[in-house]
Image (cartoon, grey):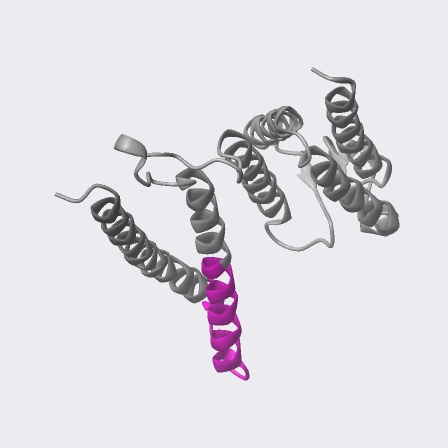
Amino acid sequence: MSIQEHRTVVGSLALFAAGLGLLGAGNFVYFSYAEGRGSEQWILPLGYAAAALGVAGVVVAWQDRTARLLLAAALVVLDVILVWQVATNLDFRFVWEAGEGELVYLQVVLGLIALTLIATALQPARTQEAGPKGTPGAGRWMVRAVAYLGATLLTAYVVAMAGIAHHEDDCAGYDGDCFAALAGLVWGVIAVPVCLLLVLVIELVLWRRRKAARAVNDPV
């Protein structure tokens, strides 16, 4: 590892660690209600600073393949720790604006960033997978898979929020139970197979293009 690569690795991991430190200092993460932290004590500017440091860490790591892999490993470890705490510690909480599901959102974002770093490190843009006799291969399929996953999750979330908003409007002035959240969840679930069908269509188009390119490069 060269000096520049070493600096990139250390810099990205240091920014990541500093971001975690600011989240702790800003009272966004705690392990017990006995710690006495509440919404009135969250220091939101430190949260924004932590997010900025996290983004900066990814930007720095992007310059080097090894840095991307090591930062991805750190993100995976953090995600595993979060899952472990949720499963074993009922008092564990991550709070940003006291909204529902904020810890889940954090875990999903960390996971997607880690997958993106791993995929781009293993299949960098300057190389392309080659098929037999130098014909086009499947390309950066890992990168595409992560992009598909992220787009599917985002679409499902947006559709679910739209469903909730739609049914909340229908519930306005209604005295009975409102199942807007459940209806939004159903909308989001329905969006997933639609996205997967679109992914299948895209991959079929790409496969046909690769097949046509092979026919040109290796005529019968």
Q: Is residue 84 shown left or right of residue 170?
A: right
Quadrant of residue 134 within the rendered picture: top left
Specify the quadrant that holds the C terminus: top left
Q: Position of residue 142 (x, y in %)?
A: 43, 38
**Residue 178 in sight here:** no
Q: Which residues are magenta?
A: 155-181
Magenta region's main secondary structure? helix
Quadrant of residue 135 within the rendered picture: top left
Residue extending furthest left? 220
Residue drawn at (69%, 35%) of the image:
63
Q: Position of residue 100 (x, y in %)?
A: 61, 53
Quadrant of residue 75 within the rendered picture: top right
Q: Is residue 37 shown left or right of residue 164?
A: right
> Is residue 187 part of the magenta span, yes or no?
no
Q: Position of residue 193 (x, y in %)?
A: 31, 56
Specify the quadrant that holds the N terminus: top right
Along the viewing direction, whichever of 96 and 61 lies nearer the viewer: 61
Examine the rendered structure and indicate whether residue 215 appears above or below residue 62: below
Examine the rendered structure and indicate whether residue 216 appears above or below residue 86: below
Residue extending furthest top? 1
**Residue 33 in sight here:** yes
Residue drawn at (55%, 43%) of the image:
108
Along the viewing direction, whichever of 169 and 2 lies nearer the viewer: 2
Q: Is residue 3 shown left or right of residue 136?
A: right
Q: Position of residue 21 (x, y in %)?
A: 82, 32
